[in-house]
Amino acid sequence: MIYFDKVSKHYGDTRALEEVTLSVGPKEFVSIVGHSGAGKTTLLKLLLAEERPTDGSVFFESINVNDLPSSALHHYRRKIGTVFQDFKLIPNKTAYENIAFAMEAAGRTDEEIRSDVPYILELVNLADKAHNFPNQLSGGEQQRIAIGRAIINQPEVIVADEPTGNLDPINTFEVVEILKKINELGTTVVITTHNKGVVDSVGRRVITMDRGKIVRDDSSGKYVL
Amino acid sequence: MVGAGWKNFARGGAVSVATVIVMTVTLAIIGSLIFLSALLTFTLDSIRDKVGVSVYFVTTASPNEIFALKDKIMQLPQVAEVAYTSREQALEDFRTRHANDQLTLQALDELGENPLDASLEIKAKDPAQYESIVSTLSTTPALSVSGSSIIDRINYEQNKDAINRLSKAITAVREIGLAVVIIFALASILIAFATIRLAIYTAKEEIGVMRLVGASNAYIRGPFIVAGVVTGALAALVVIIGMFPLMWYAGHKTASWLGGFNFFSYYTENFVFIFMVLFVSGIFLGGAASILAIRRYLKV
């Protein structure tokens, strides 16, 4: 489903990724771990086509992401749901609107939006906070809204960059449980994390990165640095 | 998209208000340049109307001969207007002009006959064209039945320097005026552009999120363009409405020392033109500035 073929990414003299080859199959739950600067976020940015590789190719299904023209990127990105450490909710939109606008952006009808958004709010246990603005929500609630926004268009993959980085243990647990539930429903999930508890709780494939290279790819879910 | 644009604008709060204020200042500058330009044109036209070339005729020239020449002059493309003054009219004008100068009137009476010539007062469309009109007159003989020239003299040579200087001054003032208008308009457009860019900069994270959830460029750009257009339209309305009392006051206070130019009359007589210029400028500036400002955030 996702295939990195000898991908390198250099920023001037800094080598963020060095000949990384990696494949992720459908319905996998992959945790990418590593120290800061190991190249985890760069890997995700390349998958989202936020960055282009210096060398090598990134494939999503049969699409070579490198070849996508700017005008086609928005169609491509609708196949991938994204979750960030800092939630990246739009501050002047309510929880409902933050989820709805991802559907609007994908060209869904008002009727679809009216029927799907309440369902997603229920799924992330925030139906009662639909009309709250992000600054009226806790960190965990904001992250759950962000997850709702990521899954609303039923993407094939969810990519989460340090999704629990700003959360306390209870909210971390809730977010991991939601991601596990999404994966069980058939969506591929790729997360980056520093949190050993998260990796242990997921108990699935763990890829360890160091200085731009994959140093361990462990299917048994062990967090080793 | 329009609804989202309105929401963007309404929720922008202080940033939206600041953008409208800056845009209002910009459009007020553009509006005042319209009035300045009208005042300049009015003043230059008034000065130009005071300049002319007079052709004086010998006392034996008949009115018919003078009218024939007048018709010829009227056909010249450079000529705007030709006015005939008969000998009798010239005498009457002279008497009126010197009504308080008994010595001169006494001397005139002692002559026993009208010593003044009939004349044609020629106004050119452009002061720079007097030379070519005079040159045409010199090369076109205006002869009486007896074969002698009916033109006594043309006062161009005495006025030549003044006319030339005035002509150059008018050109210079027009060019400087145009340059000032362009500089001020550009400066104000840049200020408006920078402000809208700042307003969009505050939303750059939001734009980034929109891109990542798969929003097309048109979807992202639309509400910002609508918000820019709303900003421009609101600012234009503020300026147009604000001008009413301002021009009323300025018109009453300044008409007497601006040679008859009244700001308020100009405002009311040219309201549609002023409204269109400011409204279209506001909408165009707001929309174009938004398109240009958001472009950099839509790459990749």
Image (cartoon, coloured by chain):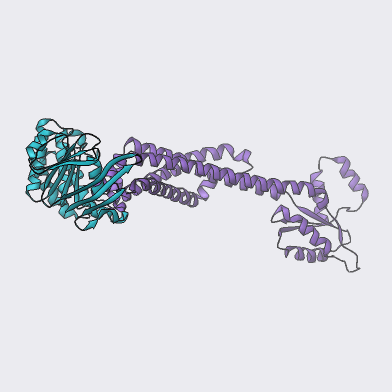
Chain colours: A cyan, B purple
Please say whether residue B52 is visible from this viewpoint.
Answer: yes
Establish if B109 lies above or below A167: below
Position of residue B253 measured from the top left corner of the image (x, y, whole percent):
57, 36
Rendering quarter of residue A41: top left
Q: Residue at x 45, y 42 (%)?
A: B239
Residue in front for this viewpoint, A191 or A204 = A204
Q: Residue at x 63, y 47 (%)?
A: B174
- In this view, the residue farthest toward the bottom is B145
* Total numbered badges shown on the rendered structure: 0
Rendering quarter of residue B84: bottom right
Position of residue B20 measured from the top left corner of the image (x, y, whole percent):
39, 40
Position of residue B199 measured from the top left corner of the image (x, y, whole percent):
36, 40
Position of residue B112 measured from the top left corner of the image (x, y, whole percent):
92, 51
- Left or right relative to A175: residue B64: right
Residue in front for this viewpoint, B18 or A5 = A5
Q: Residue at x 90, y 48 (%)?
A: B109
- In this view, the residue farthest toward the top is A168
Residue in front for this viewpoint, B79 or A188 = A188
Please say whether residue B23 is visible from this viewpoint.
Answer: no
